Image (spheres, rainbow, N blue to C red):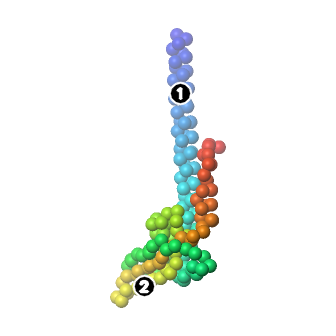
């Protein structure tokens, strides 16, 4: 009889502990997702877009490659802020952990006025101390429930 009572108490205790374990796991996963979202926002904020060039003698850089997209002509397609955001997203997707800026950004409308083509160059500065620091700021951090 004492053994059965002990077994029942043990089973009830284990059943009660399971939701606590899953709550801690869920909290850790939420924290990791939040951290990834912060890093993504910092990546996007870090990259700047310009229609001009950058003087290589004052700020040496390497061209990573061309960014280009075409879409149907619309008010959104010619919106400068939306073009800038899309170029930033493309640069971060194509050159993650490398891109520092997007230069020579331009848009052209085809002769029929039906399509807009946006193009630019993604670059990486030879000395990117800020970007390196930003990408390694959470190394060694331990996620723990509060």
The residue nearer to you, when weighing 38 against 4, is: 38
Identify the residue at image location x=55%, y=74%: 61
Residue ID for mark 2? 108
In the picture as drawn, the residue positioned furthest to the right comes out as 146
Residue at left offset 47%, top offset 78%: 120
Which quadrant holds residue 94?
bottom left
Give the quarter of the image for residue 59.
bottom right
Question: Observer-nearest residue: 95 or 34?
Answer: 95
Give the x, y percent position of residue 145.
62, 43
The reply to whether residue 47 is visible in this rendering is: no
Tell me if mark 2 has few (under 14), some (14-19) or many (20+) residues whose alpha carbon lies within 10 angstroms of its own: few
Classify mark 1: helix, strand or loop: helix
Q: Is residue 37 above or below residue 143?
A: below
Q: Quadrant of the C terminus?
A: top right
Helix, strand or loop for disc 2: strand
The residue most toward the front is: 57
The residue that appears at 57% across and 40% down in the rendered structure is 24
Q: Which of the 4 image quadrants contains residue 118?
A: bottom left
| Residue 58, percent from left and from top | 62, 79
Kindly report which numbered mark, 2 or 1, lies closer to the viewer in this rendering: 2
Q: Residue at x 52, y 18 (%)?
A: 7
Eyeballing the image, is 92 above or below 69?
Answer: above
Q: Residues within 10 Å of mark 1 (few under 14, many from 20)?
A: few
Q: Position of residue 125 (x, y in %)?
A: 57, 71
Give the percent coordinates (x, y) of residue 87.
48, 73
How many numbered discs, if any?
2
In 3D space, how far apart are the residues under numbered discs 2 and 1 (Cα atoms)?
66 Å
Q: As rendered, which of 121 and 6 lies closer to the eye? A: 121
* 54 vs 144, nearest the viewer: 54
Counting residues from the start of the chain, the first of labels 2 and 1 encountered is 1
Where does label 1 land, which residue?
A: 14
């Amino acid at each position: 009889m004492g053994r059965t009572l002990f077994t029942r108490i043990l089973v009830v205790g284990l059943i009660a502990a399971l939701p606590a374990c899953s709550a801690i796991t869920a909290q850790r996963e939420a924290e990791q997702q939040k951290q990834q979202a912060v890093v993504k926002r910092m990546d996007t904020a870090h990259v700047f877009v310009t229609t001009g060039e950058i003087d290589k003698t004052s700020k040496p850089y390497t061209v990573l490659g061309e960014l280009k997209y075409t879409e149907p002509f619309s008010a959104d397609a010619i919106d400068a802020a939306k073009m800038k955001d899309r170029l930033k997203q493309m640069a971060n997707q194509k050159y993650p952990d490398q891109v520092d800026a997007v230069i020579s950004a331009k848009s052209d409308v085809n002769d029929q006025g039906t399509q807009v083509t946006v193009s630019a160059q993604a670059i990486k500065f030879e000395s990117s101390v800020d970007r390196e620091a930003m990408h390694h700021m959470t190394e060694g951090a331990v996620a723990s429930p509060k």
